[in-house]
Image (cartoon, rainbow, N blue to C red):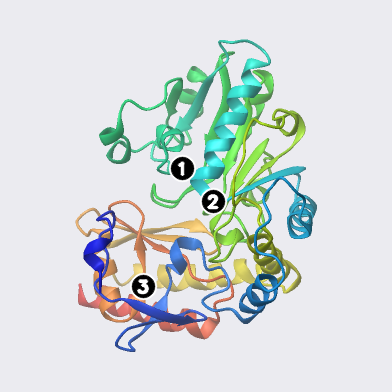
């Protein structure tokens, strides 16, 4: 089937998937799987959502790409909708999360130079993940991703997550930006403490540094609010998005407020495909479904339902240490002796798609419109796996 022609960059499961419908995905043999990976928090409305399919059909028959040399209606509409959902004012559209984070870093660097040439340092968090391009990789706090590609960009400083004392010791006038996830995804579904975020916000203001929240995985409704920062009550200067923003269609975005909105001028940045009418039309449809369709309003209830079911399993299976995360970005933390990949593999055999987050956390990121019946089916398989371990 030509698999040998694809670069060896993923440890893939053997089946080849050929179609999907809602929360279900089907391989070439017709086997049905419950998909609680959702393209790694991408398919927020599930597979082949009728509204998305209709939008792609209609927009592709009208205008797919026109270049950012010209305005297009769908990009303007999407930017306005995003601005109305929170505190951010201006948008730049790209194609992925790592692209969005690259631009966020560029904005911070240029912003710093408005004060002094030496104001260039960027603080990032240990165990974070911001992407695999060189800039984003340089602020990804995991050596396993960084080491093969050193030297990375300079002027970056690692900070312990949720450690106010460590952050205070590393913050100074030479810092132009701080980039972080309010919930670390690849790092184990670890939530930021509100006091930590508040101290960072305070010191960024004091030192004229931009606060960047990477909401690529945790945003777009996954925590029960459209923007993840709204769950914590701390407003950043920049938000980066992708994944659920397009629900399976490639799109990323950088959202800014205040002085961060005025840093770039024509020629500072660009994206050939960014903000094309087709991608923006899909994103508009998804926002309408999530917000006006009431899907986000149900996320917390589904989260509580799922968490309680897993916590009940904890009483019967000592291998479960705790449940991390919030909304429909949850992680089952296992005792050290059980690797996540072992659990994920057994669940896959039973027809449930899960994904790890670090060595011993199993991540649950179902579509946001998952039903309680579908949650029950997935939870039953999870229970069966624990019983067989």
- Give the percent coordinates (x, y) of residue 315: 34, 69
- The residue depicted at 46 percent of the width and 20 percent of the height is 155
Residue of label 3:
353
- Per the model, the C-alpha gap separating discs 2 and 1 is 8 Å
Quarter of the image where one finds residue 339: bottom left
Left or right placement of residue 77 versus residue 31 in this view: right
Looking at the rendered structure, the secondary structure element under dot 1 is loop
Q: Nearer the viewer, residue 276 or 345?
A: 276
Determine whether 216 is above or below 264 in the image: below
- Per the model, the C-alpha gap separating discs 1 and 3 is 23 Å
- Dot placed on the residue nearer the N-terminal end, 2 or 1: 1
Residue of label 2:
216
Q: Nearer the viewer, residue 270 or 170?
A: 270
Assign the N terminus to one quadrant of the image: bottom left
Left or right placement of residue 81 versus residue 280 in this view: right
Q: Is residue 239 visible?
A: yes
- Dot placed on the residue nearer the N-terminal end, 1 or 3: 1
**Badge 2 density bin: few <14, some 14–19, many ≥20, Cα 10 Å:** many
Left or right placement of residue 80 versus residue 334 in this view: right
Assign the C terminus to one quadrant of the image: bottom left
Looking at the rendered structure, the secondary structure element under dot 3 is strand
């Amino acid at each position: 089937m030509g698999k040998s022609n694809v670069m060896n960059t993923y440890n893939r499961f053997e089946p080849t998937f050929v179609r999907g419908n809602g929360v279900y995905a089907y391989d070439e043999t017709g086997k049905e799987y419950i998909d609680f990976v959702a393209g790694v928090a991408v398919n927020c409305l599930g597979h082949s959502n009728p509204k998305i399919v209709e939008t792609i059909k209609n927009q592709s028959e009208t205008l797919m790409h026109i270049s950012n040399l010209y305005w297009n209606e769908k990009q303007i509409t999407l930017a306005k909708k995003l601005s109305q959902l929170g505190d951010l004012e201006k948008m730049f559209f790209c194609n992925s999360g790592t692209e969005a984070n690259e631009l966020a870093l560029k904005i911070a660097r240029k912003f710093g130079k408005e004060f002094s040439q030496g104001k260039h340092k960027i603080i990032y968090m240990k165990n974070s993940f911001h992407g695999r391009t060189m800039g984003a990789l340089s602020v990804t706090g995991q050596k396993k991703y960084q080491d093969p590609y050193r030297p990375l960009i300079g002027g970056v400083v690692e900070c312990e997550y949720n450690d106010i004392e460590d952050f205070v010791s590393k913050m100074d006038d030479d810092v132009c930006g701080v980039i972080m996830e309010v919930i670390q995804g690849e790092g184990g579904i670890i939530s930021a403490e509100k006091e930590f975020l508040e101290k960072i916000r305070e010191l960024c203001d004091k030192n004229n540094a931009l606060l960047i929240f990477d909401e690529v995985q945790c945003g777009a409704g996954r925590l029960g609010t459209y923007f993840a920062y709204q769950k914590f009550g701390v407003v950043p200067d920049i938000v980066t998005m992708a994944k659920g923003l397009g629900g399976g269609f490639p799109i990323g975005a950088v959202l800014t407020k205040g002085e961060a909105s005025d840093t770039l001028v024509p020629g500072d940045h660009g994206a050939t495909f960014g903000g094309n009418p087709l991608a923006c039309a899909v994103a508009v449809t998804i926002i309408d479904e999530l917000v006006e369709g009431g899907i986000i309003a149900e996320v917390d209830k589904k989260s509580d339902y799922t968490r309680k079911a897993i916590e009940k399993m904890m009483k019967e299976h000592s291998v479960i240490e705790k449940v991390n995360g919030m909304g429909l970005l949850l992680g089952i933390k296992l005792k050290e002796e059980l690797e996540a990949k072992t659990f994920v593999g057994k669940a896959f055999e039973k027809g449930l798609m899960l994904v790890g987050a670090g060595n011993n956390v199993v991540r649950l990121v179902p579509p946001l419109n998952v039903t309680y019946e579908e949650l029950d089916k997935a939870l039953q398989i999870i229970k069966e796996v624990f019983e067989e371990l």
